Amino acid sequence: MGRGDGTEGSACHVSHSIRVPGAPGPGRKAGSHGRRLGPPPPRAGPGYAAGMKLQEFHARELLHAAGLPVPPGRVATTPDEVASAAAELLDAGHRAVVVKAQVLVGGRGKAGGVKLASTVDEARAVGAAILGMDIKGITVRKVLVAPAADIAHEFYLGAVLDRAAQRILVMGSAQGGVEIEQVAKESPEAIVRMHAHPHLGLLDWQARQIAFALGLGEHLGAAAAIAKGLVRVMVDNDADLVEVNPLAIVREPGPGGAASERLVCLDAKITLDDSALVRHPDLEARRDLGEEDPADTEARKQEINFIHLDGSIGCLVNGAGLAMTTMDLVKRAGGEPANFLDIGGGAKAEHVSAAMRLILADPKVRAILVNIFGGITRGDEVARGLVEARSQQIREVPMVVRIVGTNAAEAAGILRAASFVTATSLEEAAERAVAAVRGAEAAATSEAAR
Ligand code: GDP
Ligand code: MN
């Protein structure tokens, strides 16, 4: 990861502690055999790095490859492609098709992004309606066309990393289809929870117990196999989340016309651990750049660990620990960091200017705090990067720079010649940055009053 493999650099673990503010803690509700426990771990909210999400059709492929029952489907990007995919499925004897928006947000169904069609023309029309649709701020560019399922019941089944327990947590609920967060809030007792063994995965009895708690009856064996499969998919792909909602009992026409029932994964959601993607180049290749924040794409290209936050002070730091400390001191001085940013060890001038561009691209940034502890990273190199970045700067933002360690004296000379505001201690730097933000805010207020 990154350039820094030593004391500076790589923030692999940091992004995790930031993105899950309060993993499932010990405050669980005691239940029967301690199985029905408290609310599920919170999801990453907007503004936090959230791992790499796979599109549903990619997630379905992974589940299918692991031997789980997933209906076939085809991706289409135009209404005509939707029509031809539908024609194929209808010709093969399916009664109808489902057209599903492929966007990396939940609640597509509610937003009108999942629709059934029973003729080719209808499928084309539905495709035209969904393609280009806006779902939670994202424009739909692809849809999945699959045989429509005749759903008898919807369940929830998911595996998530429980950081507090250092285990994979499998959760199931008979109230599937709806958002699990809502179930957790309104009726936490309706969720069954089971921790998988770190080496052995979900054990048979555990998988059966989940299936039993969900009331799966004749589908108990199939459900248990799926529960175990989710954990396998999670481990094999270094995922943080593998979720099937709905896991559905569907009615299918049997051989002699008699209907039979089957358990299938009708939706699939997988989030991969960013830090483990180096081990999965095939999965990395499935990243949907069209739906990624351009700042994140740029940061990855430059090997900068960048996490967007909500404050007004942009922080440019080398080393994950130092970046955390810097954020803490900004807070202590009464400010709010706009980001976590670690340029890594041995960063060159061009990384510094790239980092500066990332920070300035956020309109909320009112001041910038640069805090460099030179080790492998050379202070003069960073200083040169800052001078270059400022010459290309598109808007004026006050900046406070603190550079200590390797080549600090050379750095100080460069910064002095370029009239930068500098600070010697981190406390001082943080205070000055906060003062600069207050100054900018006061100026904006009096401007507005005039
Ligand atoms: P999400 O809303 O983004 O989670 O998308 P889903 O894939 O979970 O679809 C939402 C809902 O649409 C499901 O809970 C089902 O009720 C419904 N749905 C999805 N696929 C089918 C299907 O093949 N047939 C029928 N009848 N309903 C479906
Ligand atoms: Mn769903």
Image: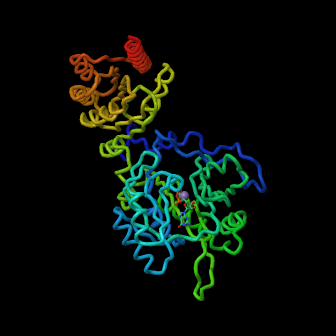
As drawn, is 94 to the left or to the right of 187?
A: left
As drawn, is 144 to the left or to the right of 419?
A: right
Q: Is residue 109 visible?
A: yes
- The x and y percentages for residue 72 are 46, 72
Q: Nearer the viewer, residue 434 or 137?
A: 137
Q: Nearer the viewer, residue 182 or 411?
A: 182
- The x and y percentages for residue 376 are 31, 35
Q: Residue at x 42, y 41 (%)?
A: 11
Number of numbered discs overlaid on the protein picture = 0
Q: Quadrant of the C terminus?
A: top left
Q: Nearer the viewer, residue 329 or 251?
A: 251
As drawn, is 142 to the left or to the right of 254?
A: left
Q: Residue furthest right?
A: 32
**Ligand 1 picture quarter:** bottom right
Q: Where is 170 relative to 351, above or below?
A: below
- The x and y percentages for residue 81 are 35, 67
Q: Residue furthest bottom?
A: 256
- Residue 159 placement: quadrant: bottom right
Q: Is residue 287 visible?
A: no
- The x and y percentages for residue 168 are 59, 56
